[in-house]
Image: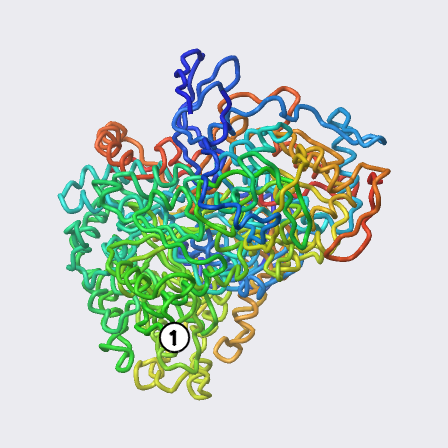
Amino acid sequence: MTYVDKPSVPNVVKFDEPMETKRDKLEVMLNTGGDIYQGACKKRGSTLKDEYRHASGTAYMDPRDMAKLGVKNWDTALVKTDWGEVVVFVAHSRDAPHEGQIFICKGPWANVIVSPETYCCCDPTYKGIDATIERTDKDPLLMADLMAEVYMKYDNDAEKSTNRLTDKRINVGKTK
Amino acid sequence: MAYEEPITDYDHIVENCTCAFCGCNCDDLTYLVKDGHVVGVRHACRLGASKVMEDMDQRLMVPMIRDDNGKLVEVDWDSALDKAAELIAGAVRPVFYGWSETSIETMKYGLELGELVGAVLDNQATICHGPSLQAVQNAGYPVMTLGEVKNRADMVVYTGNNAMNSHPRHLGRYSTFPRGYFRKRGRFDRTVVTMDPRYTDTAKMSDIWVGFEQNGDYEFYNAMRAVLRGKKLKKDIISGIPKEDIEELVESMKNVEFGALFFGLGLTHTLSKQRNIDIAISLIQDLNKFAKWNLIPMRGHFNVNGFNIFMAYEMGFPYGVDFSRGYPRYMNGETNTIDLLTREEPDVFMVIAADPGAHFPGGANRHLANIPVIQIDIHWGPSTELADIVLPGSFIGVEAAGTSYRMDGVPIYMKKAIDKPETCRDDEWIVNELLKRVQKIKGVDAKMASK
Amino acid sequence: MEYILKNGIVYDPTNKINGEKKDICFKDGKIVDDVSSDAKVIDATDKLVMAAGVDPHSHIAGPKLVVGRLYRPEDSRRGIVPKTDVTRAETGFSVPSCPATGYRYSRMGYGTVVEAAMPPLEAKHTHEEIMAIPNIDVAPLALFGNNWFTLEYARDGKIDDLTAFVAHWLKLVKGYGIKIVNPCGGEAWGWGMNVHGVDDPAPYWNVTSREVVRALSQVNENLGLPHSIHLHPNDLGHPGNFETTVESMKMVDDIAKNAPLRNQTIHMTHIQYHSYAGTNWRDFESGAEDVAKYINNNDYVTCDVGQITLDETTTMTADGPMEYDLHQLNGLKWANKDIELETTSGIVPFIYSGRNSVHSVQWAIGLEMFLMVDDPWKIMLTTDSPNAGPFIRYPRVISWLMSNKRRMEMIENEEVHKAVQRKSSIATLDREYDFNEIATISRAAPAKAYGFDDRGHLGVGARADIAVYDINPNDIDPSNEYETIEKAFGNAAFTIKDGQILVQDGEVVSVKSSKTLWSNVVGMEQKEKDVMKKVMPVFNKYYTVKFENYKVHDHFVPNPIEFTVQAGK
């Protein structure tokens, strides 16, 4: 057995008339942080593996929100903020109820959508970020693929992208 | 979790090892060793055990350099170190980031190297408890060691922190469950309060959960402080909490014998950042008029506090120290890693015992794609995907000895239990080698420093 | 390597050399009778020569220093000096960084400093900082006054157990001697309380300061440690506390001394803070006379002063409740650090101002103590750095002591508040220290009180720890030329440590590693083993570290100077 097996999450709770409030897209508040599964997976060094993608690349949601969105455990969703967008799994949160909030463990997936703004206080704003979450058919990327796609450090053919904070083109490609 | 058979197949045990995970620095671990590998760990939590019984698949075993095709290829130690030293010696604005998962002994060489080349030295505090340190500088620092909590506390407050997930043995070993000198019945003699917008696993084990609103930290603590100072609250509900509940909570906090408050990143990562901690510290100071109260920041890595302490005694400032002008400079929001990266200032980035790839916002990490990155670490992680030179280190507290500081500032000498893989080197050795090579390039003699 | 320091004017009170023109020879780090003609000549013609300074009480290394640095970047920014080819960058004014601490002591001609408060649980931290401090030797005193084992054994009168416990603990933490801070008050602070006077018992433990101090004093003499107990008595900084202070000295007057070098059985530290009369801050006045009188009449007491220097500084002490009171008084940021089973501590920034009547009277009380205690061997120069002012102000204090004119000027020009004339007798004291007395209070007396025979004097066999100051004592009139005095004592012409020239013309020209002085009690190993059988169950239950990880490993003491103490001899 692995040390990082997932918590047992029950299937989505059926609420009264969930379809009535069903939405394609929810406006939520995004929190990030650590949990024990993500921590254990990260520190034992299994970051290239699928277990890390599940531990870290998952949005934990209130079951009511999941019902509204019409998703069940380990479906996938697209989370967008002012700083980026990323595809993650969704799962029932152990901390529920917290309608209107989603929690994604810290890691390469959350990094894409959290705010690097420190307000001159050295610490980025990792918590309390406005976000939207919608259903998607895409699968979350494994860590190495995500890093390659987002940062394009060693991808000579990648299109030039823009650093949102500075509006500067970043140099894509190998370092000299 | 399924039942697991106890491990009986081992050669020998090593006792009183120190866990190299979180700021709890539990120093009571027993490693079960077979054929030079740790095959089992006793007393550790899930996090500690997972780190000690690491995933060898992703262990960095050999030095590597990126080739022209963008692939990391194995090289010998001399080539890797020379190349890294050349990059560091030629840098205009180098940043040495990390240090929180290595020993004080390693930091000593790192600091000497930083002073020599005029680097910025910064650690993980910059993305976790940096605001706490700023608040400490604003408001004060009433702290204690964890044994004070164990022996005396009859009220324990966790705020903005999910200790059951981030510091799993904190409640069990130090704060809540242990039977202390004046708290002979352990858990039954204490009231546990969790103040957190999330109904966390820690909240679930508490006697009282105060689920104030997201980003409502500052208002909530301010209201508590106002009540404590005898003011009437004008609003009925503050940060989602009815005023009667606040009054009742304050009353019970006033009437304890010894209270302990532990705060975590929930306070530092939300919008009001250091102001949340300011007000929490002020609250604790005010509470001392009625009862004994202290606090401890829940430091995340086993030596994140150590780096702050080390830099403070060597250079007077805790983190984000810039040596580019020949003297140490510390300006929050200016000489910190995230700000430097988003401003695209650094031209060489050395990351030691840290993982910016996993923990920095993308907006900061993007600059790491522009510049050479040197990584000293033990596992292939997200940062390795951005690294140009990889130097495999060793595992402090398991494969190498070293000093670390617990979250409450208690120093612990973490002992060595097994040998490191033959092809790896100790962090201390690697950084010292870099120092020697940079000194050679710069034509300076190894100084008779205060070593 | 041989050296001859030529034609200096030497003050060496230990060897009764009082302003003699004399050569000092040293070889391989030790002072010798004579050297060969190959010896390197250091010209000190008509310059003031003394043994390197010995600071008997200063806070320079350890957890509360680091809290001071962590939470006062404003202080770190105040003393910034860029790195040079020889030195690393310096920061800090009242809580300097470790390198700055070493360099600054060197520049003043000091060679040895006693770190006055080391909490045993965090002793490794203190030793790490000592390693990071260059150029001076450091003797850390371990805190025992509020240790639970001390409280228990003192209450139950188990002096033998306490003796073995202290002997063993000094080994574990590599401490030099016994420090006692606000006995029982520290434990009371565990519950946010304090004790008042020497007969107020600690909550729960039901033991008084009197019992604790007497027990530790007996232990100290049973062991025959080189230093006596080092007491920071109860009621620090409270108006009217001089009675507690006198009582604290009285209560050990029957303990027989057991050590060859020192005269005292009790060292009272920062006595200035403990010589207050009055009942509140309004009628607060000097109580120095009674305290000085007691010291003058009793040879078993020594003290250091803790002179207020009228600076912005950082107060830090293991006296936790006092610091909270101070925070309530001045409203500046309060840091506190309680250490399980052992001690407390607190830190508050403080601005001592000559505009403030209380601070000015405190300034006067310190000087009164210097001037009223007749025998300079009983009183020592300190500012309780950084509490009453940073140690870099020692030269200024020396200039005050040597110049009545300067003191009167300060009073007349109202550089200090006019209250000092009403509330102290400072304006009536016209005594001026001479160089021999200065040499006594800043080197000879502290060395003797600590049982150092290898430093603090210039006799043959001593370490070549020498300070040369650029003044001609036969020419200068310190009373008028106080500014020259201050400058000279702050910028040594030469500071030599173990025969190595560290400072020349006020600049640090070389650095060396610090050494750690500690007391190793031998001859009671069986008793220690027996007492540890009783200690261990308590240790395992109530500490939060394992015993194996508690001790200070040799790794943290790379350059030890071990004082071997034959227990009971």
Q: Label 1: which residue? A: C363
Picture residue at 64% right of the left edge, 61% below the top: C81
Placement of B415 over or under C264, stated as above or below: above
Q: Residue at x 25, y 77 (%)?
A: C280
Residue B45 appears left or right of C183 = right
Can residue B436 be seen at all in this image of the molecule? yes
Q: Is disc 1 placed on a helix, strand or loop? A: helix
Q: Position of residue C135 (x, y in %)?
A: 55, 49
Residue at 24% in and 27% down: C526
Circle count: 1
Residue B376 image point, x, y percent: 66, 35
Chain letter of the residue carrying label 1: C
Task: Answer with the quarter of the image where residue C260 lies.
Answer: top left
Crowd around label 1: few <14 · some 14–19 · many ≥20 (10 Å): many
**Is residue C446 visible from the viewing direction of this image?**
no
**Colour convention:** rainbow
